[in-house]
Image (spheres, grey):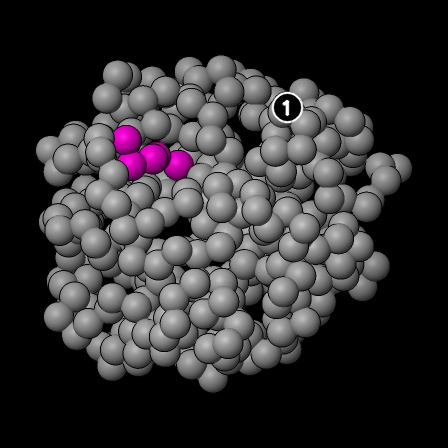
């Protein structure tokens, strides 16, 4: 689930055209687990008002009118949705790159075959610990770790590429290197780390957020791993990484190009409302899953109108509108701070990123 990206070397005005590169679509909020850090506070459900099959088809038609983004089928747990492969196939036929975010515990040989037949090109599976003790504590279901490993083995059997996603908190920060090594041993094509954003049940874990200093140290460590491991690494909900990337490359005398730094050379930190958006289970369009702001509902407005005209999206596209130290920061076009974290702390999604130790020059 990697991002196509755009050139952020020039100023983006609020009214300039922004190409939609990726959509995370919460097709259901229902989930078979009850993770402590879940942004949606998902449980088994059912949840009323979820978009039906015909509505999803219509929204995909509308998305296709303005681009061919990567679409992440997510939840909750998307495999609980009975029409999931019908929707995946429809998106594939529209020319989207269809991928799926799953906890892995419901994967079977039958549904992996269906994933491949419907055109799903990659899945992500979350592992928040290198062992059952740590991972199951996050998931609040005994056996979740073994269930995810079983799912991974089935995906491997049928040559379905998978990546590992890990949310970092104080509880597993000391284990992150072991989780990376496990990802490599399992045969993952990528390892994406997520820095905890305290929304949903994650609000109860605010004391588990790592410090700003540990945040910085972790991202420096992650940068160093790029030259040492044979899988794609990406930091998500960690926009500071793109500042660190440029600082380190300059210090090392390296030019940042796609050949030397892959997709990291072409993208920026916070993409919410710029080249990425989130669609909730009831059709609410948001900058991301962690920033639960109503930018418009696909039941009430065509998706292209929401993407182009939402006032919130227009704000997020105006980098000069950032508050606090993000405003004058020379890295604001490549970092942008986490808008969700800013909103959770201050109530203002344009406020400064609260977990950044960097002081603008």
Relative image position of residue 123 (x, y in whole percent): 33, 62
Nearer-the-camera pick, 99 or 293 = 293
| Above or below, comparing residue 88 to residue 324 in the picture | below
**Magenta residues (range):** 278-282
Residue 280 among magenta residues: yes
Relative image position of residue 53 (x, y in whole percent): 13, 38
Is residue 12 visible in this depiction of the protein? no
Check disc 1: other Cα within 10 Å, few if <14, some if 14-19, many if 20+.
some
Nearer-the-camera pick, 225 or 143 = 143
Write the residue at 50% across / 76% down: 133
Write the residue at 64% across / 23% down: 348
Residue beneath disc 1: 348
Relative image position of residue 314 (x, y in whole percent): 52, 19
Is residue 193 visible in this depiction of the protein? yes
Main secondary structure found in the magenta portion: loop
Write the residue at 71% across / 62% down: 218
Nearer-the-camera pick, 203 or 219 = 203
């Amino acid at each position: 689930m990697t991002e196509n990206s755009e050139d952020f070397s020039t100023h983006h005005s609020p009214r300039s055209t922004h190409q939609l590169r990726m959509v995370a679509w919460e097709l259901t909020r229902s989930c078979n687990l009850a993770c402590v850090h879940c942004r949606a506070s998902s449980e088994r459900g059912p949840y009323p008002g979820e978009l039906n099959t015909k509505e999803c088809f219509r929204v995909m038609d509308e998305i296709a009118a303005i681009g061919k983004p990567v679409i992440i089928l997510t939840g909750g747990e998307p495999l609980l949705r009975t029409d999931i492969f019908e929707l995946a196939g429809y998106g594939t036929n529209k020319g989207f790159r269809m991928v799926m975010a799953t906890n892995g515990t419901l994967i079977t040989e039958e549904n992996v075959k269906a994933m491949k037949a419907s055109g799903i090109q990659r899945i992500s599976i979350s592992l928040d610990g290198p062992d059952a003790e740590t991972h199951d504590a996050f998931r609040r279901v005994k056996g979740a770790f073994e269930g995810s490993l079983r799912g991974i083995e089935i995906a491997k059997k049928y040559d379905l590429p998978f990546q590992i996603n890990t949310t970092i908190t104080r509880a597993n920060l000391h284990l992150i290197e072991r989780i990376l090594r496990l990802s490599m041993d399992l045969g993952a094509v990528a390892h994406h780390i997520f820095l905890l954003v305290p929304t949903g049940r994650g609000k109860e874990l605010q004391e588990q957020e790592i410090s700003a200093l540990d945040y910085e140290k972790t991202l420096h460590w992650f940068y160093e791993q790029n030259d040492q491991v044979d899988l794609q690494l990406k930091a998500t909900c960690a926009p500071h990484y793109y500042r660190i990337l440029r600082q380190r490359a300059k210090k090392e005398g390296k030019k940042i190009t796609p050949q030397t730094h892959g997709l990291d050379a072409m993208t920026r930190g916070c993409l919410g409302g710029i080249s990425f958006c989130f669609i909730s289970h009831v059709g609410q369009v948001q900058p991301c899953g962690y920033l639960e702001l109503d930018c418009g509902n696909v039941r009430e407005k065509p998706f292209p109108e929401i993407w182009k005209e939402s006032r919130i999206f227009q704000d997020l596209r105006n980098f000069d509108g950032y508050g606090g130290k993000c405003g004058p920061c020379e890295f604001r076009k490549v970092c942008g701070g986490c808008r969700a974290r800013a909103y959770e702390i201050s109530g203002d999604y344009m406020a400064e990123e609260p977990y950044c130790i960097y002081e603008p020059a």
